[in-house]
Amino acid sequence: MSAVAERNTPAPSFAGETLGSDPFPPMIQIGNVSAPAAPVDLDGTGLERTILSDLALKTAHTLPRCTTKWIAGQMHLPVPLVEELLEQMAKDHLLEVLGQEGPFNRRYTLSGRGHERVLRLLNLSGYVGPSPVSLEAYSNLIYLQHSQFPEVSLAEVQRALGELVLPPDDVMTSALAFMSQRSLFVFGPPGNGKTSLARLLHNVVERDLWIPHAICVGSEVIRLFDTQIHQCASFSPAQPWKIDQRWVRIRRPFIVAGGEMTIESLEMAHSPTRGYYEAPLHIKSNGGTFMIDDLGRQRVEPAALLNRWILPLEHGFDYFSLHSGHKIKVPFQQMLLVATNLDPERVMDPAFLRRMGYRVHLATPGPERYREIFEKYAARWHAEVQPGLVDRLLERYRQEGRELRGCEPRDLIGRVQDICQLRRQPLELNDEFLDLAWTSYFGTKRSLER
């Protein structure tokens, strides 16, 4: 994507703090990337020492013997800072020093007193892993990064959506939604490109983000980085120790939630056995795109599901209550897409429809649009479309009473590609192969009429 000017967005405020105020992670420039700087002392972590000490003790508990360097690697903190924690715990008789490995690197094991304390700590929180960052630091950096996303032009959106065959008005509406970062409601029959539209829109901006492994609120830990969802960016700095390793650089997330969604899945998921929280999907999608697919198929009434989003949509943040009694405010900074193949008047109340930024109806394609879609996919495969081939295909749809679907040219050509690959020959679109593709796709065996 071509370089464009960054948005001239004023620094947003959060919980009484502006982006120019503390707490805010100090940033350093690594090449052309701005990155959170590694803390130079324990105060620079933004966390209380007791939180870090408890985490270090639980980390040491996972092995019979361990070193400062190993614990620092698990906690994603600089070795001198971790050695300072461990040295104090040794003075408090929670750890025993077994020997020296090198500068700031000694061998430790838990003492009897340390074992007793770990058991109490694990009853409160079982979290062991990278050190968290403060909620304020996460919130401020998410708002800052989101405000610096580049503006997009209509031409860029048109190029991104170029592999779809859409009416110009649908492309314009999609561009307006993406440019304004307002929500987009997409509806229409299944198989006409709702998910494809969402994914291609998401790809208009190719940017990376910094997110933390986990967030700390008081003594509560919320796990944010998810290897099943987030894709790490290709970033290999020459001096990685200058970067705060508690943060991960990821690609802008694209997260789809479908029929498995419940009201409970929109809250912080607390596990009594693990003793920490898992952030919900819409928070994990901050900085990217969150798509609610197949609205109306969830195990909860659509009105109840959508009412949950009214406040976040209007204000750009969401509230959560933790078991400790803390009520926290977390950024809701992503593009929200809601898709359904049901009648929108049946699954959405007027109040929520008014709050949706833009709406696109991906209608069933007519014969000419179907022909254009077919020819576009064939051209992508460098396959020639013989005269009359699409006409015969459309006639078969008519004879069998099938409604045209925008995804079916791609699916049928893909099956012809499989047939040709099996026969060890170049892709060829002809009546014989399309008839076999049709049979394997729809299950009907009547040949195309010639």
Image (cartoon, rainbow, N blue to C red):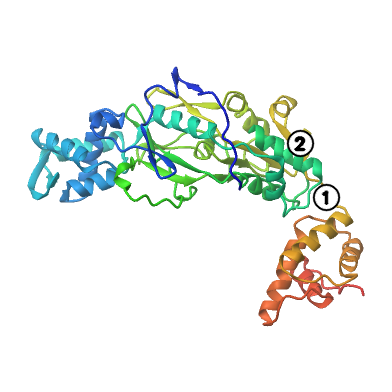
* Amino acid found under the numbered disc labelled 1: Thr
Q: Nearer the viewer, residue 437 or 235?
A: 235
* Amino acid found under the numbered disc labelled 2: Pro
Q: Residues under labels 1 and 2: Cα distance?
A: 16 Å
**Tag 2 residue:** 344
Q: Quarter-wise, where is residue 402 in the image?
A: bottom right
Q: Residue at x 72, y 50 (%)?
A: 193
Query: Does residue 269 appear anywhere in the picture?
Result: yes
Above-or-below relation of 88 to 329: below
Left or right: where 124 falls relative to 160: left
Which of pointers 1 and 2 indicates the residue nearer the eye? Answer: 1
Q: Residue at x 75, y 37 (%)?
A: 173
Q: Residue at x 37, y 49 (%)?
A: 237
Above-or-below relation of 241 to 419: above
Q: Nearer the viewer, residue 434 or 101?
A: 101
Q: Nearer the viewer, residue 266 or 165?
A: 165
Residue 387, given in percent of the width and then of the height, sits at 89, 71
Q: Quarter-wise, where is residue 54 in the image?
A: top left
Residue 104, given in percent of the width and then of the height, sits at 14, 44
Q: Which callout, 1 or 2, points at the residue further toward the start of the chain? A: 2
The quadrant the C terminus occupies is bottom right
Q: Residue at x 64, y 31 (%)?
A: 306
Q: Quarter-wise, where is residue 83 in the image?
A: top left
Residue 382, given in percent of the width and then of the height, sits at 73, 69
Left or right: where 11 falls relative to 44: right
Residue 445, given in percent of the width and then of the height, sits at 82, 73
**Tag 1 residue:** 364
